[in-house]
Image (cartoon, rainbow, N blue to C red):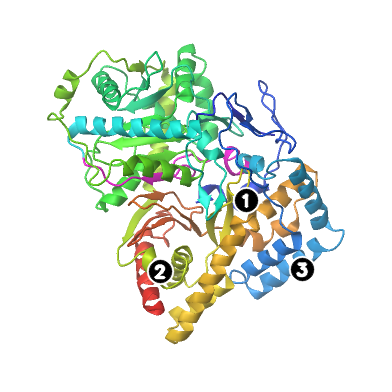
Amino acid sequence: MSRIRWQCSLGATPFSLLISNKFQLPLIRRCLQTRTAVQPARRDEVRTNKSRFGVSPRQNPYTHQLPHLPVPPLQQTLDKYFKSLEPLLSDGELQHTQKLLTAFARPGGDGEKLQQLLESRAEETENWLEEWWIQKAYLDSRVPLPVNVSPGIVFPQQSFAGTEGQLRAAAYFVSKILEFRELINSGQLEPDMMKKTPLDMAQYLKIFGSHRIPSGTHDEIFAGGENEERPYIVVIHKNSFFHVPIQSVTGQPYTVNEIFQHLINVVAQTNVHQSIPVGILTTLDRSAWARVYRHLQKKKHNRHVLNQIHHSLFVLCLDSLDERKSSKKSAMTDAARQVLHGNGSDANSGNRWFDKTLQLIVGANGVCGWNYEHTLIEGPPLFRMMEYVMKQTGPPYDFPSHSSGNMRNVSRHATAYESKPMLWELDEDVISAVGSAKASMDTAIKDVDLEVMEFTQFGKDFIKSRKISPDSFFQMALQLAFYRMYNQIPATYESASTRQFLGGRTETIRSASEESGKFVEAMVAHTGPSTVKKLLMEACDAHKKYAAEASNGQGVDRHLLGLKLTAIENGHNIPELLMDVGYTTSTHWKLSTSQGNSSIPAFMCYGPAVPDGYGCCYNPMADRIIAGVSATYSYAATHSGRFAETVADSLEDMRKTVM
């Protein structure tokens, strides 16, 4: 049953949740006392902005017809699945899995029965996976959102001159974001394309006014719930919350300078209002946050504040300078930490509301970016909006200040523009919970080993000149680096887009293959150059083929998940095949990866999927490759800096191989 609704208007790596054991939990049929569960939309329903999540009164302006997500043939998936296990399992483990596969696939057996049920679901719904995916990959998870769920996208470093410069930049960003929103709402935004195929644009309709609500066993998600009468944003500065309208009472959009005046008003008021970091409560695990959330709601005033946050277009986080000593990391790594998690309770981790789908971060140090709640959207729409904003600014991304920019001068600019403070009614229980959230967040951040690699020897232009897919080439560099460090082939998740289908999200590219294994073994063994080159080309070709099949809805992992959830929903036992060592090993993603493409020096970062693995999102630019690499300090064998260095060395060695 869905916990997902559209509230009002259209205007609006697996990352770390795709761990196999979370899917072992029974799917309990339930609905909240105050809500009616929404069934998946039937194929005979007209899809305007009607969704499994409810009904929005506006028409969806993106009406190009898209096919439905297919259910792959069962035997095809089983054959492909077994092939993906070959570099990961011992001979004995492979033999055991082969027996299970044979039993599962026999005529009239469990596989055939579950396949038929899944195909029936696909016939009756617009997208057989969408509801399940949102529920099981996101809303059922109890882990904290920062690092584990919510990625950060880091913009190119900005040039500010004091507080005024920061506010001018923020005002400009807000203005351009609102322009982009208008393109979405009016249908003027050209559809994203995969070569000549238009992609599903539904995710763009969920960026603004969307939010996640904590609950004890499973969260709820609301899409497009912005205030239509007079849209506004919520601004957080020094942990204080402000309601900031973005248009006049007559509906006229505010100019950049008028937004700037509102932000000056925010800064001028910050020191006279409470600064207890209530936002840090959104960093708690979801069950703990749900208990505090229910307690907050007991006060009518708090319900009003929460409602204002929920119905805002997005949250603008005006970050303060981190007064602590430098982390001795690169400027890009420091920026990644600020955008991903705020860098601690004594920095900016409390200056957030992680339940909001979109947070724009504008730091006093020139660090800017998105942090986004992942349930409803993937990275590409936000990369596109970021490029729209940044390309109109252009290098050197400089926002000149017209005063010294200190607080006294900025305060003098405060005008009658009303940016209203949103004050909480807090008791000792909430204040105690804030203290606990600070402690748990700081502990979690200390375990995040994050490094940004900027590889400048070459980029995708060189790789393309060798007639190789840049994505496949980089994936093989990751395989080689891991093998060099651990003498092991890692189970690898790479995200592939399935947006060519209605309601499509992602599928897994299993980048570790028999071909990649042969390549890395030959490379490490210093086999002859011609042999190594041949094996590298074969590995890249195999990866490119799998990636294309995954994007075409012919992957392995979503199909296997569908069979598992079909069994649960229909009272069947979970197939043994989906609980044996082959499945648990091949879904323990020691490399959780994705590609975040941008023509400007921006990048994405997120945490590893498993404690003993790495997260890696990379932007292959024309002349360089930027990658955010993460690991955990608590697992002694992983080290993001060393891994990034090994990836860079592997890229250079592979370049020599294909020359």
Specify few, some or many for label 3: CA neighbours under 10 Å numbering under 14, 14-19, or 20 or more. Answer: few
- The residue lying at 48 percent from left, 20 percent from top is 227
Residue identifier under label 1? 21
Q: Is residue 154 magenta?
A: yes
Main secondary structure of the magenta stretch: loop
Residue 548 locus on image (x, y percent): 58, 61
Residue identifier under label 2? 463
Specify few, some or many for label 1: CA neighbours under 10 Å numbering under 14, 14-19, or 20 or more. Answer: few
- The residue lying at 64 percent from left, 45 percent from top is 66
Tag 1, which secondary structure? helix
Tag 2, which secondary structure? helix
* Direction bottom: furthest residue: 528
What amino acid does circle 2 point to?
A: Ile
What amino acid does circle 3 point to?
A: Lys
Q: Which residues are magenta?
A: 136-159
Specify few, some or many for label 2: CA neighbours under 10 Å numbering under 14, 14-19, or 20 or more. Answer: many
Residue identifier under label 3? 99
What amino acid does circle 1 point to?
A: Asn
- Spatial CA span between label 3 and label 2: 42 Å
Q: Is residue 631 magenta?
A: no
Quadrant in the picture for the N terminus = top right
Of circles 3 and 2, the one toward us is: 2
- The residue lying at 36 percent from left, 27 percent from top is 277
